Image (cartoon, rainbow, N blue to C red):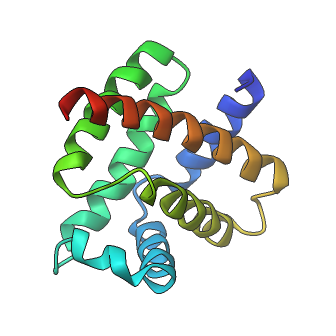
Amino acid sequence: MTPEDVERVTRTAARVGNDTDLSAQFYALLFSRHPELRPLFPVDMGHQMHKFVDELGALAVALPELGGFEARAHELGARHVGYGVRHQHYPMVRDALIDALAAHLAPDFDQADRQSWELAFNLLAEIMLEGAELTG
């Protein structure tokens, strides 16, 4: 990732803030595209909606300092193993997240923003998977 990619991710994440409307868009997309993932989540998604935007913001803030980002992502990956998250789920989540961000931040989310988020998510997924392997 370039410094410009990091800046785009942190800037767009800051625009989301703690708006759980993004969470609602994300989960609606994820579950409509991949209904088999719904059982991995709680029945009442209220708390999950807040956790999602909080974690997204925290990861974006940590991104410029790779060491802190890496530590947070490792821990997140280790935790997600216990929720039943598997390697094949990561691209599903990435695509739903980026499409939700594009819809939520439209018209101010362009192709460069999309590419920066893809890079950031792929980095996150790689480090989370390392964290998952350390627990398994």
Question: Which x, y percent locates residue 75?
Answer: 26, 31
Q: Please indicate whether residue 12 sits to the left or right of residue 82 in the image.
A: right
At x 58% / y 41%, what residue is drawn? 122
State whether residue 83 is above or below residue 2: below
State whether residue 75 is above or below residue 121: above
Question: Which x, y percent locates residue 18?
Answer: 40, 56
State whether residue 56 is above or below residue 93: above
At x 43% / y 36%, what residue is drawn? 59
Q: Quadrant of residue 2?
A: top right
Q: Please indicate whether residue 19 sits to the left or right of residue 37 in the image.
A: right
Observer-nearest of 56 and 20: 56
At x 47% / y 86%, what residue is drawn? 32
Q: Quadrant of residue 95?
A: bottom right
The C terminus sits in image quarter: top left
Q: Please indicate whether residue 23 sits to the left or right of residue 94 in the image.
A: left
Residue that sits furthest to the right in the current view: 111
Q: Quadrant of residue 6?
A: top right
Question: Which x, y percent locates residue 52?
Answer: 34, 57
State whether residue 91 is above or below residue 59: below
The N terminus sits in image quarter: top right
Disc tally is 0
At x 82% / y 47%, what residue is drawn? 112
